Image (cartoon, rainbow, N blue to C red):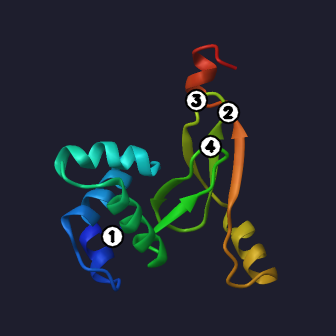
Amino acid sequence: MKNLKSLLEESNLKITPQRLAILKELENKGHASIEEIYETIKEMFPSISLATIYKNINSLKEEGIISEVCLHQKPKFEISKIPHAHFICKKCGKVEDIPLNEVINKNIEEKYPNSHKELYIYGICKNCQKNGNS
């Protein structure tokens, strides 16, 4: 994956410490809600508002730098990458990326060129299974 600064350099967005902090948080967590991002970032930038986080998230999303993962709970965001599925634990809500088979990607792209692909798989994660939460 490209470094975070180069993601912004290749976009129409100005490189700001707040945007870099948002991307760093998404890189660290993989998937995070706006509230989760805000809680971490306000420790670095005490004067930052939730509205500023929303505005930056929307700008990053419009530029295609991040993607919104539409869950039944609050949406989470991730740094955009090749098409993949998401496994969502029905117990703890953990979200994991699952690679999509190249044959599936090619088949979808042939039938529906330039389509946006979202695939969600719901189940119980290994940690919840191990802890008897199934």
For disc 3, the neighbor class at 10 Å (few under 14, some 14 to 19, many from 20) is few
Gap between marks 3 and 2 measured at Cα:
6 Å
Please report whichever mark, 3 or 1, sits nearer to the chain's N-terminal start: 1
Q: Which residue is mark 1?
A: 2
Marks 4 and 3, Cα distance to the nearest angstrom?
11 Å
Residue with the mark numbered 2 = 90
The image shows residue 87 at horizontal and vertical percentages of 64, 45
Most foreground residue, 84 or 14: 14
- Residue 104 visible in the displayed image: yes
**Circle 4 is placed at which residue position?**
73
- Image vertical order of residue 29 relative to residue 19, above or below: above
Considering only vertical position in the picture, is 73 above or below 134?
below
Residue type indicated by callout 2: Lys
Q: Which mark is residue 92?
A: 3
Work out how far the residue at label 4 is from the one at label 2, CA to CA, in angstroms: 11 Å
Residue visible at 76% across and 74% down in the picture = 108
Identified by mark 4, the residue type is: Gln
Q: Is residue 41 left or right of residue 76?
A: left
Task: Report x, y in % for residue 5.
Answer: 24, 71
Question: Badges 4 and 2: C-beta atoms under 8 Å apart?
Answer: no
